[in-house]
Image (tube, rainbow, N blue to C red):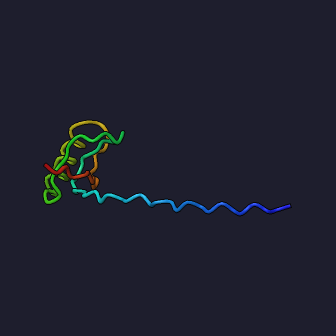
Amino acid sequence: KVAKKAAKKRATRKKVVKDVRLKAYWGVFNSGLKRLAVFEYADKRAAEKKAKELSSGSKGNHFIQLVKEPVTEA
């Protein structure tokens, strides 16, 4: 009996990961995690003011959270 030669494994190519650029924003959310407003990263105070305004006016708490979204290049 002649032993079969082991088949060579094909070299698998690694997927090239495309760098996705992200931009940071401040999002105002309600207690149901629904995003109600978005502010530029530099406008954190405006986002906090909006969250406080919404919390005092209606039922439920509103909070701000950092949101990162991909940048679309034109």
Decide which of 28, 58 is in the foreground and name it. Answer: 28
Q: Give the residue at x 29% y 60%.
A: 19
Taking the view exactly as shown, the residue that stands out farthest to the top is 58
- When the figure is inspected, residue 56 is found, relative to residue 22, above or below; the finding is above
Q: Give the residue at x 31% y 39%.
A: 34
Q: Give the residue at x 22% y 47%.
A: 51
Q: Position of residue 17 (x, y in %)?
A: 36, 59
Taking the view exactly as shown, the residue that stands out farthest to the right is 1
- When the figure is inspected, residue 74 is found, relative to residue 3, above or below; the finding is above
The N terminus sits in image quarter = bottom right
Decide which of 47, 2 is in the foreground and name it. Answer: 2
Q: Horizontally, is 10 left or right of 70 in the view?
A: right
- Corner quadrant of residue 14: bottom left
Q: Give the residue at x 41% y 57%.
A: 15
Q: Position of residue 44 (x, y in %)?
A: 17, 57
Q: Horizontally, is 23 left or right of 33 in the view?
A: left
Q: How many marks?
A: 0
Decide which of 42, 48 is in the foreground and name it. Answer: 42
- Corner quadrant of residue 10: bottom right
- When the figure is inspected, residue 58 is found, relative to residue 20, above or below; the finding is above
Q: Position of residue 24 (x, y in %)?
A: 22, 57
Decide which of 50, 24 is in the foreground and name it. Answer: 24
Q: Position of residue 32 (x, y in %)?
A: 36, 39
Q: Horizontally, is 45 left or right of 6 in the view?
A: left
